Structures are given as C-alpha cells and as structure tokens.
Amino acid sequence: MRARRWLAASPAGNYPDLQNPVHVLHVAKSGRFKRLYITSVRNPTPLMLRVKSNDILSILVFSCRKTGLKYGRLPALLSVAHTVDSNGSRYNHNLSVMAPAIALKVFAIAITLLCSPPVLGRSLVPCHSKAPCGSWQHQYTTMHQASMSAERPIRRLVSVPVKSGFADRMIGSVTAMLFALLSDRAIFFETQTSNGPGSLRPLTDVFAADTVDWSAFQTPQDVVSFLRHVSPTNEDADALRYYSFGRIPDVDSSYYVSMVNGWGNEHLFTTVLNESANFETVYLVLNRGMTVSVFNDARAKERLMAMGLSERTAFACLYRFLFRPNAQVLSMFPHEMSVLSDDFALKIGVQIRTGDLANLEDSSNRTALEIYKAFFDCAQEIEDTRKQQGQKVVWYFISDSLLLRTAVAHEYGAKVLVKTTGIDTSHSAKETHRQGQGPVSPMTYQSIAGEHWFFSMTNFQVISFDSGIGRSAAFLGQHPGDTVYTINKWWDADPPSMGEHRNCRVQDADGYKAVASTWSLI
C-alpha cells in the first residue's frame, strides 16, 4: 500500500503503464515533451510514452526503485538520499541532478544499465524479442543457489572454452547451459582454455551474472592440464569432428566431454546425461552448438517443450537467462541503443567477415567494397520489398575490418549505422597477426559483445556464411529462418572471392534449420 500511495502521489502516477516494474530503454526529445521508451515485466514490448520534462526524473527513479536499484551506484550522475524504515519498505527520495549538462539520452542509458538486470534478467523476455521462454527459470535459479550453498548434493557443469572466437564461445556456452538444464546441474564458465596455454577474456568483462552466479567456480589446475592433453588445438587438422569423453583420472567424481569443431553428434547429449549422471562435476569442452539439433532426440524434445522451449527459441532464451551486456559494454553504444530501439523503423543488419587477416596493413585486397556487393544488393532488395510508406530505414553494419567499415560509411552515408571509432575489431581469441602484439584487450571483447547484442535487434540479417557472429545474433533475436539471408563467400580464399549473389525476397529467406546446421551450428 505504501508503494501505491507513493506512486499515486508522484508524477509517475500519471502514467498507468508504469504500475509494473519497468526497464527504461532510452529517452528522445520531441518538442516540449520527451519520448520515454520502456518495457515492463508484464508487457515486454517496447512502449513509447510522451512525458513532460518535469516528470522524467521521478519516473526514472520510480522505475529503478521497482527494479531494485542500489542508488549508491550512480554518484556521478545523481545525488539520492533515501531512508528505509524497520521493515525496509519505505523510501523517501530527494533527487537532484549533479551534472545538468549531461545529455538526457546518456542519463537514461545510465539508468537503463543500472536498473535492467535484476528483474528483466529473470523475466527472460528482452525488449526486442517477443517469443516466450517458458517457466523453468525460477526453479533452475533456486536449484543453482541451493547447489552453491551446499543445501543439496553437488551437481555442477563447467563449460571450458576452446581458444576460438566470440561466437564459438557463446554458442558452446549456451549449449552447455542446455546440458545443465537437462541434467539438473548448476552451470559455471571457466576462463582458462582447453586447447593451448593461456586464458580467454573472462565473460565478466562483458556480462553481468545477474540470474545465477556462473562465475563462482574455478577449475583445478590439474583438470585444466588434463583437458589440454585430450583436447586438440584449432590448428590441428585432426580436430575436425573430434570428441572424447570419460572419467578424469585421479580427480574425485569428475567427468569430461571434449568436442572441438564437431558436427552432428546429437548422441553426445545422451552420453553426457547418462554416462555422467553419478558424477558431481562434468567438464564440457565445446565450441559448436546443438540447441536446435537436440530436438531430434525424442526424450530431450519432450522435456524441453514441457519447459516452454522450442527449436527457434531455446538459444535466445538460454543466452538471455545467463548473459546481458554490462554497463561498460552498453555505454560504448549509446547511438546504437537509440536507433535500434525504434520499433517502427525497418532495421536491416549486414555482417561481413573478411577474415583473420582483416586488420593487416596489406589486407586491402580483402576489404575492397566491390568484393562484397552481393551483401548490399541483398540489403537493398530487402528494403525495396519490405519498406512501408513513410518508414525509416537503417542498415546496421558490422565487420571485422575497420577498412571495410570506413568504406561502407563513405559509400552509403546516413543510411548505414556503422561504428568506425571507439571500437576494437581484433579477433576475440587469437593473438593479433601483427608482429609483436600480445593477447586481445578487454575492449576487443566489449566491442564484439556489444555489436553482437545490437545486431540481434535488427529485423533482417544479411550474414557471412563462414561466420558464427551473424547466425548466432539472428537466433538471439528469436526470429531465425524468417529473416536471415546467408551470402556464400569464403574469407580465406586466395585470391579473395566475390560474394555469391542471391534473391532476397520474402520467400527466399533461409530456413532456421539451415541457418542452425552449418558452420558454427547453433
């Protein structure tokens, strides 16, 4: 009742759509009013409110209160004094802007970063995704917490990364979560690689572990050494279709499954679920996906569908349950957040992989715009056949080549949304190919994690066949198969090959199973 009285007495009470916990997407100026884009737990579809300027701060504070904001995390932007009574339910707010020159968009984005994880991370319905995710989340979260507090016998699954790129890592991680869900195990993610010395960037560089604490376990060094012995490197030709499994010698109650660059091993699920059932810890080395192909297994399909997951939605639902870009990542993309949050615009994503040699000084023959004409012809056909009268159109372009990004920005001008500064396009796992440079920086991982997330907010995707970034982002948006157009072009061809032209009409979109069953899989 106190909350209701506070709401009714505040400017937020003038906006009935704010009666539920809300998530502020961004604020845009419109004359004397501001356009406030929000979602709520009850209504995940972005909602636009025309809000009076004097009301905006109270609404933002109210939204943060409902989502459990810790006010001390925003000292640079706001000064908030609050008191809490003995039962912790009463707040008195005194809000004043410390830096009035800060742009309102940036302010709203900061609020978004601080408010979004606790509630929306559990709601499992992101602002740009309308597919349902079932009702398994609360039960799994409770189980995970109990497992960490020793309230139940130890049953954990540890995903150990392969030294490969961001898409491979995330696809393997989400598939590991699928294993964990089906086998009733708490999920954790290791940083040390299984196939060669060193570590990848920790996932906590780019994601907040809000729903379950998947970062709270460290793999013993003797287990890491064993996994490096049984897992081949990506450079090993014998790695293709390679996998092995079994008990880890001399380690109590531990089992491993290692599959690097493997395809078509749906029976791996049966192996893990059955053979490892009596082990406390399962270590899974994986860089390929099976969140779609697992539905070929009748028992797994029955269980997953009972949970409310489907072939089209499992990847996105599991990804969004575990991972949401943190404040540092999203703060790199304020313009992308503003543009791609517009539900009324036609947003066409174009993703081109030029290859691991993309950022070498002598790579101009691989980054010439004419080589990739098929991608942009496809985007134009999508625009010509989908655009409604008066609709804004934006092409969101991402690539591993700064040279190509610059060329695209010059060629297509205001139509294209492309980031050419404040970003690192180095490969997210391998050392750079330039002599003398070391491992990738945190900014490399932040760059790709952010662009991957925002690419999933596009309506249609024109993607490179030989890359997992575009296809996994399409599945992350939960609309694969209706919107994806794959362009065949091999990045490592010598001399560089032209992209193959294709039709990009409505009826020409790739089927979701075709997207999920090639290259990195899903």
Image (cartoon, rainbow, N blue to C red):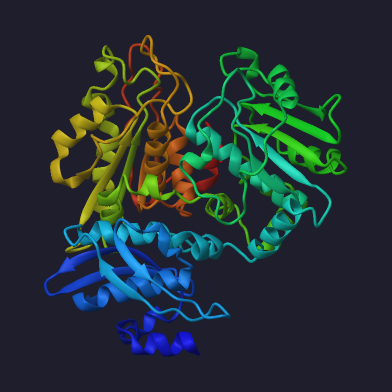
- Residue 162 is left or right of residue 42, and the answer is right
Residues 252 and 395: in front is 252
Instruction: Indicate whether 366 appears above or below 88.
Output: above
Give me the residue at 65% from left, 46% from top: 177
Percent position of residue 512, x then y: 51, 47
Instruction: Indicate whether 271 appears above or below 43.
Output: above
Total residue callouts? 0
Q: Residue furthest left?
A: 31
- Residue 339 is left or right of residue 234, and the answer is left
Q: Residue furthest top?
A: 435
Give me the residue at 75% from left, 49% from top: 185
**Do we see residue 225 in this rendering?**
yes
Residue 266 occupies quadrant: top right
Percent position of residue 440, x then y: 43, 25
Residues 17 and 311: in front is 17
Q: Quadrant of the C terminus?
A: top right
- Residue 274 is left or right of residue 26, and the answer is right
